[in-house]
Image: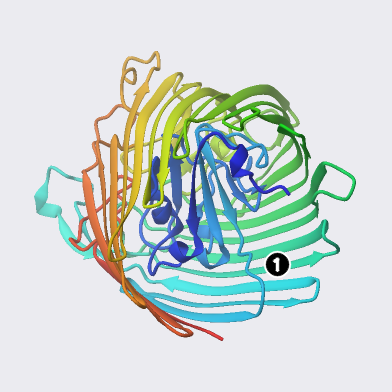
């Protein structure tokens, strides 16, 4: 109970399984970008800041959950996917258009749910990974089951020098005399991650589970000039703790319930006391705490399911400037309630899912741009309705329309850290999403075609200046609409083909003449992906191509990003308890910049070997 019931979901859904997540050299953001409607942006090499966009939404507008616990917050609106260890994931669910009631908060264009491993039995796996530019990893995973108890854990240690080659134009693209080829400086990172999960089944209905995840990351902070003497650094320690009690269809009742409590601690230290990155000398410490109680209940009727969800949360951010002694605090208390009724027709060919979301939040600030102790109270209501019709055994039609809201985060309001400047004049953004899709499934493949339109008001977006310094602004109205096509097909001789294509039309409808009619920054108009896999007895060969075109770095569309075509290939081999993988990524050695002035690596190679006891 509490897991998303796909039979009652009317949007577009994709699941990335564990074997895909363990692809050698892959990052979570990159794997997500291979799915239709998702674009990935990363500030550089392995371990650097990484976020994804669903159907033109920003990272802050994309809710990311961990086993149903929302990771986005007032202090961290965008989830940095590079903080998350792939070994700790059992699968990843992508929901486009609408957000299932089991997850709560609705995203502008969908949501992600990261699911921890759910293996049972006795198993231990050790994995070694090595790759280009000093990439190394040691990973361990184990699970054991004793009667009603199940215990599993993972441990990962990963690091990379990230000293790849880049072409530095020294900030003067029209002057070729000062251009030079050099190594990337101060882009190293190291991360340790630990996950523990303990489950207890009291009886056939009642179960308990506790999940604890710890991660520690240290990294350099490169800057656009690639100064060899740059010493700026960033360190993050994160703890997630979650406890759930689930009662699944107890005897004599049609109600199932889940009651959970959760806590997140995040400690960050940013050191640029030599003023080498761009906002002056900084030495800041911040502490983010988030705690909450979540309750979910569902009633199974003869023709439908009633779902009720409540989330009471408290978030706090404390920032300390260690150079001048200044201290600031921010707190947000929020309550969200949502309900959905999933109604099936007598012949089960029709499904309708009306839902209602209510949210109230209260912010208090101290020592920042707002008056000390000033409280801001925001209330909003969101309506959503979904429809699904099964035309025949192989074809279904789906449609959704819904309202969504998002309050500005503490960081967007008064961030002033690293490469970001706060804006205390921001107001909440809202939007309406409409989508329609046709899905056809056969034994040898699936085809899905989706169209969507998303209108947004007071849209919050991040704009960057020539030095890469970002600032969030309300740009007024915007409209994002697009088309998605996905297809998979199984050929004879164990050959699998997969193809995704997305076409995105984003328009800034701001009253400002310089912005009106322009494309929203950071979004590619066209996105293609193709993969072919050939399997033999114990070996799989694969080749994939990813293409992006029509993107701008800035809101006035004066800085176009280069179109990108990337090719990757790899091989997986297994024999008894052994498995090895090798991949060659970006075969043609393309130079890619998701953010203007911040290169990603060219050609890279990765190799891994694992043994299961």
Q: Toward the viewer: 484 or 232?
A: 484
In the rendered image, the residue lying farthest to the left is: 177
Residue 583 is at least partly visible in this image = no
Residue 75 is at least partly visible in this image = yes
Q: Toward the viewer: 194 or 8?
A: 8
Q: Toward the viewer: 201 or 217?
A: 201
- Across and down, in percent, residue 458 comes to 51, 21
- Across and down, in percent, residue 278 comes to 40, 47
Q: Is residue 45 above or below residue 547?
A: below
Report the number of discs. 1
- Across and down, in percent, residue 416 comes to 52, 42
* Quadrant hosting residue 411: top right
Q: Residue at x 36, y 78 (%)?
A: 538
Q: Toward the viewer: 502 or 72?
A: 502
Q: Is residue 85 above or below residue 114?
A: below
**Residue ID for mark 1:** 197
Residue 59 located left or right of residue 88: left
């Amino acid at each position: 109970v509490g897991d998303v019931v796909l039979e009652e979901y009317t949007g577009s859904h994709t699941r990335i399984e564990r074997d895909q997540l363990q692809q050698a050299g892959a990052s979570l953001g990159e794997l997500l970008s291979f799915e239709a409607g998702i674009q990935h942006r990363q500030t550089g090499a392995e371990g650097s800041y990484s976020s994804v966009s669903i159907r033109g939404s920003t990272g802050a507008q994309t809710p990311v959950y961990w086993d149903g616990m929302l990771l986005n917050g007032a202090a961290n609106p965008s989830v940095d996917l590079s903080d998350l260890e792939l070994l700790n994931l059992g699968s990843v669910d992508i929901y486009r258009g609408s957000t299932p009631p089991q997850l709560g908060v609705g995203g502008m264009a969908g949501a992600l749910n990261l699911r921890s491993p759910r293996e049972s039995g006795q198993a231990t796996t050790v994995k070694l990974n090595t790759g280009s530019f000093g990439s190394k990893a040691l990973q361990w995973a184990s699970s054991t089951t004793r009667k009603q108890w199940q215990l599993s854990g993972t441990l990962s240690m990963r690091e990379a020098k990230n000293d790849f080659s880049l072409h530095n134009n020294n900030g003067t693209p029209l002057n070729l005399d000062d251009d030079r080829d050099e190594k990337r400086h101060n882009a190293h990172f190291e991360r340790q991650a630990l996950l523990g999960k303990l489950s207890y089944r009291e009886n056939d209905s009642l179960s308990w589970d506790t999940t604890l995840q710890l991660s520690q990351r240290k990294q350099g902070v490169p800057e656009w000039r690639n100064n060899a003497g740059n010493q700026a650094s960033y360190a993050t320690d994160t703890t997630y703790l979650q406890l759930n009690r689930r009662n699944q269809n107890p005897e004599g009742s049609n109600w199932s319930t889940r009651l959970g409590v959760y806590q997140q601690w995040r400690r960050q230290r940013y050191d640029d006391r030599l003023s080498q990155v761009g906002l002056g000398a900084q030495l800041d410490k911040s502490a983010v705490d988030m705690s909450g109680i979540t309750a979910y209940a569902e009633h199974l009727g003869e023709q439908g399911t009633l779902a009720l969800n409540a989330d009471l949360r408290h978030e706090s951010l404390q920032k300390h400037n260690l150079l001048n002694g200044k201290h600031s605090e921010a707190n947000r208390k929020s309550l969200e309630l949502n309900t959905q009724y999933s109604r099936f027709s007598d012949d089960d060919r029709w499904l309708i899912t009306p839902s209602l979301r209510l949210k109230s939040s209260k912010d208090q600030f101290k020592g920042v741009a707002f008056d000390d102790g000033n409280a801001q109270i925001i209330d909003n209501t969101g309506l959503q309705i979904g429809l699904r019709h099964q035309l025949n055994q192989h074809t279904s039609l789906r449609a959704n329309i819904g309202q969504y809201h998002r309050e500005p985060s503490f960081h967007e309001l008064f961030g002033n850290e690293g490469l970001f400047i706060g804006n205390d004049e921001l107001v909440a953004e809202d939007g309406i999403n409409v989508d329609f899709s046709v899905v056809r499934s056969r034994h040898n493949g699936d085809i899905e075609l989706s169209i969507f339109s998303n209108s947004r008001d007071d849209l919050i977006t991040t704009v960057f200046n020539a030095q890469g310094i970002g600032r969030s602004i309300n740009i007024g109205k915007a409209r994002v609409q697009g088309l998605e096509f996905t297809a998979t097909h199984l050929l004879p001789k164990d050959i699998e083909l997969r193809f995704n294509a997305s076409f995105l039309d984003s328009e800034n409808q701001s009253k400002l003449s310089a912005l009106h009619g322009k494309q929203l920054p950071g979004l590619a108009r066209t996105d293609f992906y193709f993969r072919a896999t050939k399997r033999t007895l114990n070996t799989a060969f694969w080749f994939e191509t990813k293409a992006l075109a029509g993107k701008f770095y800035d809101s006035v569309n004066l800085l176009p990003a280069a179109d990108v075509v990337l090719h990757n290939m790899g091989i997986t081999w297994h024999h008894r308890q052994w498995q090895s993988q090798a991949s060659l990524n970006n075969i043609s050695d393309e130079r890619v910049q998701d953010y203007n002035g911040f290169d990603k690596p060219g050609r890279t190679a990765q190799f891994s070997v694992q043994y299961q006891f």
